[in-house]
Amino acid sequence: MRNVLFAMKPKTKDFLVYTRPNGGRIKLPNEVIRSVHEYVQNERHKSEAGGVMMGRYILNSPDVVIDKITFPMSGDKATRTTFFRKKLAHQTIIDREWEASGNTCTYLGEWHTHPEAYPSPSYIDMFGWKKKLKKDIFDSDSLFFLIAGTVEMRMWEGHKCSKTISMLKLS
Ligand SMILES: [Zn+2]
């Protein structure tokens, strides 16, 4: 257990970059990584946590930057292995950021934690992600899904048209 905690520290770089299937990159800056780390389930009592991810598409490129995330809020329901987000509170923040940024900081996807070192989506995660691809209103073709394990943060990209979800490689 302890080793897992220590193993995380050297992995905290200034940012993480994942490669998208279209050759673009998605960047997770240090402040976002640090915020997510606070919720990583590296202790037995910690429940799953999550929220939405917001950011921007870089003009004339396939690159994406995650600028902000929302955190667990009252009304969210969390246990060691599940997390349900109360929609309205997070939506309010998305709307506020969208306006404050002059319509550049947009909804990009979701993040949550898992009590495992190298996370993989559960059946329920996959089901939920596909539902979001079908129902959520968003600008682009893609949504991004981050799962923070106790050692690694992994990112998936889902496509609205094809409904395919693929894990992104850390570059
Ligand atoms: Zn999950």
Image: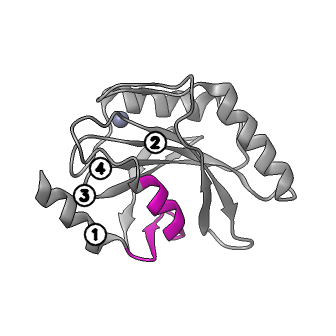
Measure how far apart labels 4 and 2 are at the Cα level. Answer: 22 Å
Q: Are marks 4 and 1 in contact (CB under 8 Å)?
A: no
In the image, residue 31 lies at what x, y percent? Answer: 53, 66
Residue segment shown in magenta:
13-36
Measure how far apart labels 4 and 1 are at the Cα level. Answer: 13 Å
Residue denoted by label 1:
9
Q: Is residue 30 magenta?
A: yes
Closer to the observer: label 4 or label 1? 1
Q: Are marks 3 and 1 in contact (CB under 8 Å)?
A: no
Residue name at image x 52 percent, y 36 percent: 72
Residue name at image x 69 percent, y 26 percent: 88
Q: Is residue 157 magenta?
A: no
The answer to which of marks 2 and 3 sits earlier in the sequence is 3
Measure how far apart labels 3 and 1 are at the Cα level. Answer: 9 Å
Residue name at image x 45 percent, y 62 percent: 34
Closer to the observer: label 3 or label 1? 1
Closer to the observer: label 4 or label 2? 4
Residue denoted by label 3:
151
Q: Are marks 3 and 4 in contact (CB under 8 Å)?
A: yes
Mark drawn on residue 164: 2
The answer to which of marks 4 and 2 sits earlier in the sequence is 4
Q: Identify the secondary structure beneath mark 4.
A: loop
Q: Does residue 75 appear to the left or right of 119 in the view shown?
A: right
Closest to the observer: 119 or 60?
A: 119
Residue name at image x 41 percent, y 52 percent: 38
Closest to the observer: 53 or 34?
A: 34
